[in-house]
Image (cartoon, coloured by chain):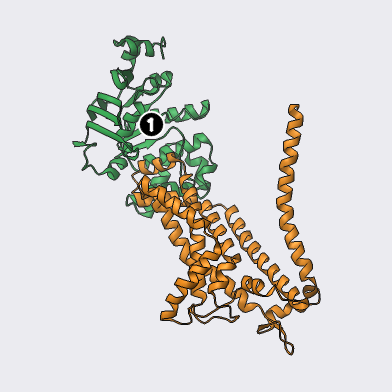
Chain colours: A green, B orange
Amino acid sequence: MAEESALIEVKNLSINYDDFAALRDVHLTIQKGNITALVGPSGCGKSSFLQSLNRLTDLIPGCQTTGEMILGGKNILSPGCDVLSLRRKVGMVFQKPNPFPQSIRRNFEIPLREHGFSKLETTDRMEDSLKRVGLWNEVSNRLSRSAANLSGGQQQRLCIARALALDPEVILFDEPCSALDPHASGVVEDLISSLRGSVTVVIVTHNLAQARRIADHLAVFWVRGGSGTIVETGATDALFTSATDPDAKSYLTGIRG
Amino acid sequence: MSRLRSDRVLSFVLNAAALLCGALVLGIVLFLSIEAAPTIFSGKISAFFTDEKWQPGSERDPQFGIFSMLLASVLITLLAAILAVPVGICGAIFRVFYAPESLAKWQDRFLELLAGIPSVIFGFWGLSVIVPFINRYHPPGQSLLAAGIVLALMILPTIALTTKSALTAISPSLMAGAAALGLSRPAQILQVAIPTARKGIAAGCALGLGRAIGETMAVVMVCGNIAQIPHSVFDPVRPVTSTIALEMGYATAEHKSYLYAAGLVLVLMTALFLLVRIRKGASQW
């Protein structure tokens, strides 16, 4: 396990969709350089929580967040927060691979040029991050071909590389393996594991075995009184063997959920 | 009815419908070709491009030069495109990415209404509003410009509505991905949404332009109908379509055959235009 120091402090977070309280009173500390897995049944606010970490919740009409999320001394949720630079620091990889249906090279040029990198830096960063996700040898001779022609697993690794190219502090993964075949899923899982120490990872997964394999910390979400909340957090091994919350215990031991 | 049999019936109906669509196009081209045959096979068709003027009725010196009319058709279409394509695309971008829901609904409704107005009404409106307006600054008013403006209004809804469909068809996850990379709104739209939807947008423009090049009724009312090569947008012009519409009623023999041949040229021009587009659509980045 990497060295412990808090990178993100979530205090009293609640998320509402119009009148519906999706998430209520969530407290969580996310450790720097660690992998934190968010687990729990569907509809308990895991994805909403993840999306509020880079303010992607802003895109959802009627969505309101209250509480505090402190990253680098600043509250992510405050109206004054510079969302564009926040998203540069907090990258995201989605459930379904979503490369831009343009050339592989353009997939890097669009974000990197937008954030002010020169052409030369863009090429360097593209090569570095493609090597980091093990895709360089597969695509180096077809960078000007469409990313849409890659396989699902390759597309997902491209998306991870694209996020890494911006040198983020945190990468959020929203069930990154669930749309992939078992082989590609294994490759992506190993890749996420390899990020430990250099990037802070927060991952939503429905695959408990996966959470157990890769996560340092676990946050178990559950529905309480009609709204999602975190019922237990802790080190992965400890939680799998001795969770105290009855719901978390039965979920993690496979009795329920 | 057994499953197999219902399958066969459906397959037959679908095949027949598909065949009919193809046959119609071929049938029309064939009909035009047969009617134009006397002109084509006698070699007189070269008169289209060698004769200077269009005076088919003249007893002493009948001339059949259609270059000025083809040029007029192309110029009117081009002008309409220059006016309508940017407005249509920008309007659709506003509709999809900026307009509040209530306004967006109204924008759709008005565009659909605009698309449903008969072309004769457009012509009538052009004649009583656009033409006098141009006439105030640059007589006579009936001109290339008037035809271009009226046509632009007619094809605007086609371009705006197809662009809107293409933009709304983009997967939300793609746009969320763009946002998650810290792209600003304009960058999301210009660098991700537009390139992703470009085939649909191109199809909308092609549909609009196809309509523009063949449009007759509105144009005939505002273009001035003088077969000449225009020196400015204020000059009256006469496109191929107007000529066919105005003269087919009384044309006989040779004259009539020339009109059919002109129609054939128009169809070929549209086909060529579509062909270029299909080729372009097929090529990847």
Identify which residue, B206 or A9, lies in the foreground. Answer: B206
Q: Amino acid at mark 1?
A: Phe
| Residue drawn where x is 72% and y is 70% of the image | B260
Q: Is residue B262 above or below residue A217?
A: below
Please say whether residue A54 is visible from this viewpoint: yes
Quadrant location, the C terminus of chain A: top left
Choose top left, top right, bottom left or bottom right for residue A131: top left
Instruction: Pick out the residue farthest to the left.
Output: A73
In the image: residue A163, left or right of residue A79 = right
Q: Please count the marks in the image.
A: 1
Please say whether residue B79 is visible from this viewpoint: no
| Residue drawn where x is 71% and y is 82% of the image | B56
Identify which residue, B138 or B184, lies in the foreground. Answer: B138
Q: Chain of mark 1?
A: A
Identify which residue, A86 or B58, lies in the foreground. Answer: B58
**Helix, strand, or loop for circle 1?**
strand
Crowding at mark 1 (Cα within 10 Å: few <14, some 14-19, many 20+): many
Q: Is residue B37 above or below residue B26?
A: below
Choose top left, top right, bottom left or bottom right for residue A50: top left
| Residue drawn where x is 41% and y is 45% of the image | A126
Measured from the top left, where is residue A124 in percent x and y? 39, 48
Measured from the top left, where is residue A62 in percent x and y? 31, 36
Write down the residue under mark 1: A173
Identify which residue, B150 or B180, lies in the foreground. Answer: B150
